Amino acid sequence: LSSPANYTTHKYELTQPGAVRSAVGNSATISCRTSQNVYSSNYLAWYQQRDGETPKLLIYWASTRASGIQGRFTGSGSNSDFTLTISGVQAEDAAVYYCQSGHYINSQYVFTQ
């Protein structure tokens, strides 16, 4: 593969814990760290994916709950360090949780996947 001399590739990495365990009724905290600051300091979303289901948006703009999402899901953080907290964990919360960041570089929006 070749690319023009003026072409620049930007690599964005997200770091999340491999697994988080919590007893029912307790709180669980999931971290997300980005290799570079996100756009507008808060362009970060959280998704929940239960086994066999499509991902569901939980949080956007780092701390805003999506429609229908219960208040026990709380997002916080800014720039490159974010946290999803689940208060009063329930059995149905067993799932994979993803963060997705958005960045603005060279007049273009870039989203991690």
Image (spheres, helix red, strand yellow):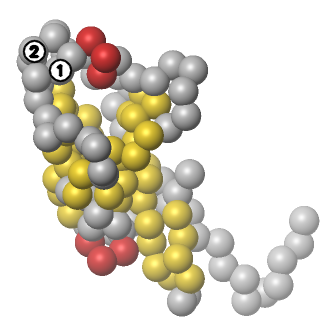
- Residue type (three-letter) at the residue carrying disc 2: Gly
Query: Disc count in the image?
Result: 2
Residue depicted at 78% across the width and 87% down the height? 5
Q: Quadrant of residue 95?
A: top left
Of residues 83 and 63, the one nearer the viewer is 63
Of residues 101 and 74, the one nearer the viewer is 74
Please tell me whether mark 1 sits on a helix, a strand or a loop. loop
Q: Which mark is residue 65?
A: none
Q: Is residue 32 at all visible to an observer of this figure?
A: no
Q: Position of residue 83 (x, y in %)?
A: 21, 45
Q: CA distance from mark 1 to mark 2?
A: 5 Å
Please tell me whether mark 2 sits on a helix, a strand or a loop. loop
Residue depicted at 31% across the width and 17% down the height? 92
- Residue type (three-letter) at the residue carrying disc 1: Val
The answer to whether the residues at label 1 and label 2 have Cβ atoms under 8 Å apart is: yes
Taking the view exactly as shown, the residue that stands out farthest to the front is 68
Q: Position of residue 72 (x, y in %)?
A: 14, 35
Quadrant (top left/top right/bottom left/bottom right) for the N terminus: bottom right
Relative horizontal placement of residue 8, taking residue 43 as reference (left or right)? right
Is 32 drawn above or below residue 2 in the view shown? Answer: above
Of residues 59 and 76, the one nearer the viewer is 59
Relative horizontal placement of residue 67, taking residue 105 as reference (left or right)? left
Residue corresponding to mark 1: 89
Residue corresponding to mark 2: 25
Residue depicted at 82% across the width and 84% down the height? 4
Q: Quadrant of residue 44?
A: bottom left
Q: Position of residue 97 (x, y in %)?
A: 39, 34
